[in-house]
Image (cartoon, rainbow, N blue to C red):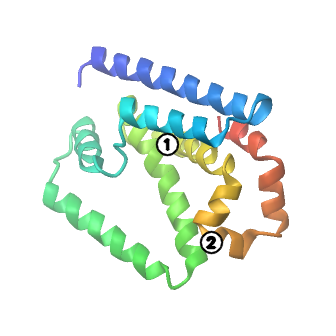
């Protein structure tokens, strides 16, 4: 990947991030968008940007290998991917553990996917991956706690009524800013 295309990607990601943060600030502090507007925004973004997460993970892995001068193998990627899937299915014996590990893995994965174009994998990049991934996931999750209670019953079962859940509801925007 040449430096010009990396710069264009960074500029586009920055613009999209600014738009997303602005919409989130407006929605949480100034004006609650009605659900039909939220759906319109979602569908517009899906139409414009697409839904690459998951579907294109093999391309991200290939790019990471290229950046770190490693060798990409689709067979190895599929084996690792299916192993992770199998491992997570075993963890569902303890739903709270599976959900917690899924969140932790998602934080790193979102950060790695979005930041791979500008940072080589390594110890220093891991911190940035985690911070960026935590920011993305916190925006997605903490601004929709009531919807998540319904979609992810484990959240309601294990957390609802706890002090931790109360703090998540009351200080969600502070946590998002902290990760930002």
Q: Nearer the viewer, mark 1 or mark 2?
A: 2
For the point 82% across and 69% down, the residue is 162
Residue 18 position within the rendered picture, expressed as x and y whole percent measured from the top left: 57, 23
For the point 52% across and 33% down, the residue is 41
The quarter in which the N terminus is drawn is top left
* Quadrant housing residue 139: top right
Identify the disc placed on residue 129: 1
How far apart are labels 1 and 2 at the CA level?
Answer: 28 Å
**Residue 36 visible in rendering:** yes
**Residue 122 visible in rendering:** no
Above or below, comparing residue 46 to residue 16 in the picture: below
Query: Mark 1 or mark 2: which comes first in sequence?
Result: 1
Identify the disc placed on residue 153: 2
Q: Please state which of residues 3 and 174 is positioned toward the viewer in this rendering.
A: 174
Q: How many marks?
A: 2
Is 93 left, or right, of 32 in this rendering?
left
Residue 170 position within the rendered picture, expressed as x and y whole percent measured from the top left: 84, 50
The crowding category of the residue bearing disc 1, from other C-alpha atoms within 10 Å (few below 14, some 14 to 19, many at least 20), is many
Residue 174 position within the rendered picture, expressed as x and y whole percent measured from the top left: 78, 40
For the point 30% across and 49% down, the residue is 57
Secondary structure category for the residue under label 2 = helix
Identify the disc placed on residue 32: none
């Amino acid at each position: 990947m040449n430096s010009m295309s990396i710069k264009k990607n960074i500029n586009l990601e920055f613009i999209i991030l600014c738009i997303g943060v602005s919409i989130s600030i407006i929605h949480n502090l100034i004006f609650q968008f009605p659900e039909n507007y939220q759906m319109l925004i979602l569908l517009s973004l899906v139409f414009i940007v697409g839904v690459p997460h998951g579907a294109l993970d093999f391309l991200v892995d290939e790019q990471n290998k290229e950046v770190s001068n490693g060798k990409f193998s689709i067979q190895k990627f599929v084996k690792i991917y299916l192993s992770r899937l199998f491992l997570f299915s075993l963890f569902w014996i303890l739903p709270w553990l599976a959900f917690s590990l899924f969140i932790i893995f998602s934080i790193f994965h979102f950060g790695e996917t979005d930041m791979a174009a500008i940072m080589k994998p390594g110890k220093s990049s891991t911190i940035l991956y985690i911070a960026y991934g935590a920011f993305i996931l916190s925006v997605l999750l903490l601004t929709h706690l009531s919807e998540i209670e319904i979609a992810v019953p484990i959240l309601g079962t294990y957390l609802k009524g706890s002090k931790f859940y109360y703090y998540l509801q009351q200080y969600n925007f502070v946590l998002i800013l902290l990760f930002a």
